[in-house]
Image (spheres, rainbow, N blue to C red):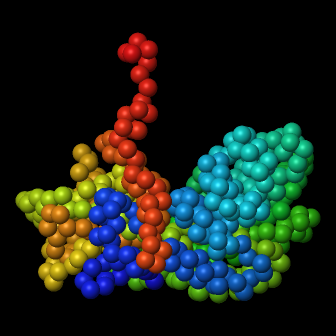
Amino acid sequence: MDHFSLREGALHCEDVPLAEIAAAVGTPVYVYSSATMVRHARVFRDAVAATSDPLVAFAVKANPNGAVLATLAREGLGADVVSIGEYRRAIAAGIPPERIIFSGVGKTADEMAYALTGGLLQFNLESVEEAEMMSAVASSLGVAAPVAFRVNPDVDARTHKKISTGGALSKFGVPIGDALEYYARARELPALDVQGVAVHIGSQLTDLAPLESAFGKVGKLIGELRVAGHDIRFADLGGGLGVPYDRDMPHPPGPQEYGAMVARITADWGVRLLFEPGRLIVANAGVLLSEVIRVKPGVGDPFVVVDAAMNDLMRPSLYDAYHAIDPVTPGNSQMTVNVVGPICESGDTFATGRRMGAVVAGDLVVFRTAGAYAATMASTYNSRPLTPEVMVSGDKFAVVRARQDIEELIRADKLPDWLG
Ligand SMILES: *Cc1c(COP(=O)(O)O)cnc(C)c1O
């Protein structure tokens, strides 16, 4: 459920007409509904509340905007971070260190030292090499690093290959079959508190079966680790639940079904559960608002050329992702079109042969479900300034990231002295 709806023929975000935001801020612009994020955070929290003292740590990479993080921090969410930049943004937004999990396959010694100094709940380690570096860094600081290994359960997540992370040949995690050996090696290293197990098999999952299979393997491993004398107190079950991008497709399983499955599988684990949802919390809470520059006739379907492009919203060109596209003031007629941006790449295509509400030059459209993995992946390709972001709350809205100024872009380049 989201808070983008038609009122008197015009699409609103909560109580604000999208046309008003376009007029005030210009297009393209991301628009977030804070009521939608808050709702998703609460629904997820409630869905896993039956487990013991769960921590819901928002996957910051889905949407690191400070206003988004601050909104979720007020709901008591923690953060799952994968870089020192994300760690610092989470702290700056008011997320307490004891609710921060640090994931990622390539943490550097500097990142480890920074987070150890600032504090955190857990590092999820992905190799013995990383455990050795962590041990050395923690020793030099005179502290113990709270760690888990992220295990790779070798399950097929049945999602797009670029967002599937739980296959045996994936770069992520340590093979679950060798996990006992990894834990034994880590125990011998100084300055590590080996406290947990972590798993994350992929994103936009539309089926609970691979998750259930992965969690089953983690449960078995926790038992084996305890027999081997490890004091396992945390299990991090990652993120990954999918959201409905295409209204005409069956909806993915919801948080309640997920929560019930988790409660059943983990009933006798005797650990604190950690969750890392990203997309589920913010995807439906955002749209990319764009203006139609012109409609260009084609040999086949006409091209609707909009002022947003692949640099603003990469998901269609990166993952062949589907975003519903709707006029902000829909009429009664429909058309079949290709929706494209102005960038000089054929990949700058949002939809091909799409049946949608008819639009003409100057009309506003929205790309729905653009609150996750969207603004954060924007670039300045084709020297297009970074897309601004707006947050709505009730009848108020605020620019939460300003449109980049082209002057800024130019000034960031420095001429070498031989050209000066
Ligand atoms: C990306 C990621 C998540 C979030 O995934 P969603 O599909 O957005 O829920 C959680 N944990 C880790 C380790 C990740 O890399």
Q: In this figure, what is the number of numbered marks?
A: 0
Q: Residue furthest top?
A: 418
Residue depicted at 26% across the width and 68% down the height: 365
Residue 290 is situated, as x and y percent measured from the top left of the image, at 29, 62
Work out which quarter of the rendered image holds the C terminus and state it.
top left
Horizontally, is 82 left or right of 26 in the view? right
Q: Nearer the viewer, residue 77 or 54?
A: 77
Residue at x 31% of width, y 78% of height: 11
Please state which of residues 281 and 31 is positioned toward the viewer in this rendering. 31
Residue 342 horizontal/vertical position (percent): 23, 51
* Looking at the image, residue 316 lies above or below residue 189: below
151, above or below 118, in the image: below
Check the image and name the residue furthest to the right: 229
- Residue under the image location 53 percent in, 59 percent down: 65
Task: Tell me where residue 219 sits by quadrant.
Answer: bottom right
Q: Residue at x 65, y 51 (%)?
A: 88
Percent from the top left, x then y, of residue 349? 26, 57
Residue 160 visible in the current orientation: no
Against 288, is 16 above or below?
A: below
Answer left or right for 40 relative to 142.
left
Q: Is residue 278 left or right of residue 273?
A: left
Confirm whether residue 170 shows in the render. Answer: yes
Which of 44 and 266 lies nearest the eye of the viewer? 44
Q: Quadrant of the N terminus?
A: bottom left
Q: Position of residue 138 (x, y in %)?
A: 84, 45
Q: Quadrant of residue 360?
A: bottom left
Quadrant of residue 19 in the image?
bottom left
